């Protein structure tokens, strides 16, 4: 071979090597789980006889969105241009639409009339002698959801030869709650600023809004509350309503309605009234007129979300009225337009000496049956706040006459902010599958939420968003999984969080089994690891004051008693834990009798809730045979070991995905290990000081003194704004 030829061959081989290193293409996480990168050849082979042509209308904006998503997805995944056609001309056609939008679908007699508005069918059929796949809804939005489902099958490498799928959402309102302020800050947000550029709206409609809508529609989310529940009145002024209307226009083709958090005292602040008393006729008229004004601009406006008489927010109790009076007044203003009120049950008061965990139930349970038909009560998953672990909220199962909505926190306020890898699927699943025993065994929280337990048709699930202006939307690639799993569980609260994690990993990173399995295992164990290094055995609320960053079990600096960690753990020389039994605060009595009896008895209480329900002596024998003290130290240490193991697992996976995302995850895991160690050491130092006990043998002492941990301060923590 002469030198010239040798040079060409070398160049050619270099080129081939570069092309084969496909997964190393630079990525920044912007595409989320809708990456649509070329499938590996063995997967693409599965679809070689499919997607030959696409038959789909574009008469409405939703049809156009569906068409462009399928083209984008199929072209990207299969690496060929799918042609558009009006009729089936060959095998492998994909027919998409509704009987109204597609004569072909009308001809196929698919019984779409029996489908709900948002439901769809995906079926393998034969049309004019050709094998085809039909994706059909009764409405356009059903067909869009079906298209996303179909793309997911390809993205996750599933066979599509013999499809017969029928999907309907089990929950009606599947809603993100943005805790975004109009000044661009996001309360408890760790992914940059608010994505709503209020300043440039309504004229500039950032293309990112469309991508936001695509991502949400792909997992069935159909509503978004744009502003923080700690709301100002400005959002209801005409200038801002015009901006809200612009966003609603962008979201409409994707089946997403906008909602607003409102400030209960708005009639005074922007309406010039002297009162916001819900029984005052002028106040009622003001809200009616405001609702009329909103619907004139946004005919499909969803309704209001309200935080009232909680953490300093105004509300009906300022006028000695009840939450029902307040909610019903707003509901009446929205009812003629089909809007709803999502009224939050997250209430507790600084003047109420009662156990904070009991206060929401005490206030709302007596109001069951007093709310108007278009009111939902939005209840956090646990009775205290969004802690790494709490028992389910006792209101679930306790208000049979009222639709109760779930409120989860997708943003990781209490779970390590952006950098810790904590997949929340197992937390959500644990709550949804918890048995309220309201009507005997099997009365799960999921059945309360989907309405099947009490026969409610107005149902909902809300998630506090983790979305911001960061290029990867959520502050880290793995945080995207928490947005994803929320949407999938809102669609069907009985899905398995492991199955959802696997879907997400395949769509977001790779279908390579050698990558998928260890990553899914790592995700599934990550929440328990965080519970262990932060708040094991039923402890909770041990984080830093106000900003909620890092450990501070010693903290008693907050103005309000139930904002202080010491309020929750009661650790001293004798023992640790909050006594919520009949001899303590009697919070157990808020659960169904069988559960109350179980939680009241230390021997029957699941150990994961032990210190939530009981004050326990340090030498108490756990089921393992160890003392409580030893077991506590072992959990704290296990949490750190688990993160070390996650780092080790990840280090074996270099090369399976692009270098950019790989390295960021690796670096974030290193941060997580450092902070898990800090959590463990600070808590061990503090509880050792409280108990006066020596560390069990074999456990390393904390790296620093208790004084050192107590001296740390963090003035500039993200996501924290004083309200
Ligand atoms: C929006 C917790 C959070 C607050 C949040 C509040 C709520 O207290 O720390 O930031 O305020 O919950 O859910 O209303």
Image: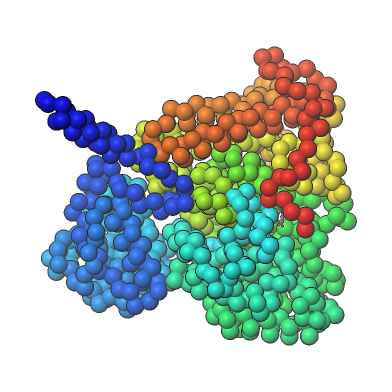
Q: Where is 427 relative to 146, above or below?
A: above
Q: Quadrant of the C terminus?
A: bottom right
Task: Please name whichever residue, 461 or 231, is drawn nearer the observer in this view of the structure.
Answer: 231
294 to the left or right of 345: left
**Quadrant housing residue 615:** top right
Residue located 43% across and 37% down the image? 659
**Quadrant housing residue 628:** top right
Residue 164 location in percent, x, y? Answer: 29, 58
Task: Please name whichever residue, 583 or 231, is drawn nearer the observer in this view of the structure.
Answer: 231
Residue located 68% across and 72% down the image? 235
56 to the left or right of 650: left
Residue 146 location in percent, x, y? Answer: 36, 62
Judged from the image, the quadrant occupied by ligand 1 is bottom right
Residue 581 location in percent, x, y? Answer: 78, 42
User: In the rendered view, how is the structure colored?
Assistant: rainbow
**Quadrant housing residue 502:** top left
Residue located 72% across and 19% down the image? 701
Task: Please name whichever residue, 333 or 412, is drawn nearer the observer in this view of the structure.
Answer: 412
Q: Quadrant of the N terminus?
A: top left
Q: Where is 652 relative to 399, above or below?
A: above
Residue 154 location in percent, x, y? Answer: 31, 51
**Is residue 110 in view?**
no
558 to the left or right of 450: right
**Is residue 299 in view?**
yes
Residue located 81% across and 32% down the image? 711
């Amino acid at each position: 071979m002469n030198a010239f030829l040798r040079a060409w061959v070398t160049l050619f081989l270099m080129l081939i090597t570069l092309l084969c290193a496909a997964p190393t293409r630079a990525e920044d996480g912007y595409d989320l789980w809708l990456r649509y990168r070329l499938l590996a050849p063995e997967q693409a082979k599965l679809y070689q006889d499919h997607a030959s042509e696409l038959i789909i209308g574009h008469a409405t904006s939703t049809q156009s969105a569906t068409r462009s998503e399928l083209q984008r997805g199929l072209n990207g995944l299969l690496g060929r241009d799918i042609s558009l056609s009006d009729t089936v001309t060959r095998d492998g056609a994909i027919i998409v639409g509704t009987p109204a939008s597609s004569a072909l679908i009308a001809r196929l007699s698919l019984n779409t009339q029996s489908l709900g508005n948002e439901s769809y069918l995906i079926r393998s059929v034969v049309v004019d002698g050709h094998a085809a796949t039909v994706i059909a809804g009764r409405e356009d939005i059903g067909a869009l959801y079906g298209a996303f489902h179909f793309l997911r099958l390809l993205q996750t490498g599933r066979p599509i030869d013999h499809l017969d799928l029928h999907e309907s959402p089990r929950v009606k309102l599947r809603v993100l709650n943005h805790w975004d302020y109009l000044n661009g800050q996001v309360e408890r947000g760790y992914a940059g600023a608010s994505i709503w550029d209020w300043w440039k709206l309504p004229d500039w409609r950032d293309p990112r809004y469309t991508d936001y809508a695509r991502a949400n529609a792909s997992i069935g989310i159909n509503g978004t509350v744009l502003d923080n529940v700690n709301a100002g009145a400005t959002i209801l002024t005409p200038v801002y309503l015009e901006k809200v209307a612009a966003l609603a226009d962008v979201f409409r083709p994707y089946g997403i309605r906008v909602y607003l958090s409102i400030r209960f005292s708005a009639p005074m602040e922007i309406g010039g009234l002297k009162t916001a008393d819900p029984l005052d006729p002028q106040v009622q008229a003001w809200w009616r007129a405001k609702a009329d004004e909103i619907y004139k601009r946004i005919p499909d406006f969803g309704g209001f979300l309200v935080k009232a008489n909680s953490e300093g927010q105004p509300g009906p109790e300022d006028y000695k009225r009840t939450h029902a009076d307040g909610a019903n007044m707003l509901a009446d203003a929205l009812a003629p337009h089909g809007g709803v009120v999502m009224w939050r049950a997250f209430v507790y008061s600084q003047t109420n000496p009662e156990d904070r965990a009991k206060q929401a139930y005490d206030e709302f349970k007596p109001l069951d049956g007093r709310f108007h038909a278009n009111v939902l009560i939005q209840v956090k998953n646990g009775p205290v706040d969004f802690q790494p672990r709490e028992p389910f909220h006792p209101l679930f199962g306790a208000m049979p006459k009222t639709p109760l909505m779930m409120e989860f926190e997708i943003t990781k306020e209490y779970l390590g902010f952006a950098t810790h890898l904590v997949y929340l699927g197992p937390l959500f699943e644990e709550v949804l599958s918890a048995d309220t025993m309201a009507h005997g065994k099997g009365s799960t929280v999921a059945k309360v939420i989907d309405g099947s337990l009490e026969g409610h048709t107005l149902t909902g699930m809300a998630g506090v968003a983790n979305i911001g202006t960061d290029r990867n939307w959520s502050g880290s690639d793995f945080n995207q999984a928490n947005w994803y799993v929320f949407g999938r569980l809102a669609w069907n609260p009985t899905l398995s969080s492991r199955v959802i994690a696997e879907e997400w990993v395949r769509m977001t990173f790779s279908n390579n089994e050698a990558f998928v399995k260890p990553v899914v295992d790592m995700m599934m164990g990550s929440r328990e690891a965080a519970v262990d290094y932060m708040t094991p055995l039923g402890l909770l609320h041990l984080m830093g004051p106000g900003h909620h960053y890092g450990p501070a079990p010693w903290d008693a600096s907050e103005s309000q008693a139930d904002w202080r960690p010491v309020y929750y753990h009661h650790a001293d020389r004798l023992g640790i834990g909050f006594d919520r039994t009949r001899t303590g605060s009697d919070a157990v009595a808020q659960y169904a009798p069988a559960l109350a009896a179980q939680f009241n008895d230390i021997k029957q209480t699941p150990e994961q809730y032990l210190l939530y329900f009981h004050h326990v002596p340090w030498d108490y024998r756990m089921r393992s045979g160890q003392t409580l003290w030893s077991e506590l130290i072992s959990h704290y240490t296990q949490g750190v070991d688990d993160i070390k193991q996650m780092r080790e697992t990840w280090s074996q996976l270099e090369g399976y995905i692009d270098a950019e995302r790989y390295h960021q995850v690796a670096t974030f895991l290193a941060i997580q290990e450092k902070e898990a160690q800090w959590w463990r050491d600070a808590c061990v130092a503090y509880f050792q000081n409280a108990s006066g006990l020596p560390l069990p043998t074999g456990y390393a002492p904390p790296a620093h003194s208790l004084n050192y941990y107590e001296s740390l301060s963090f003035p500039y923590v993200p996501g924290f704004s004083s309200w």
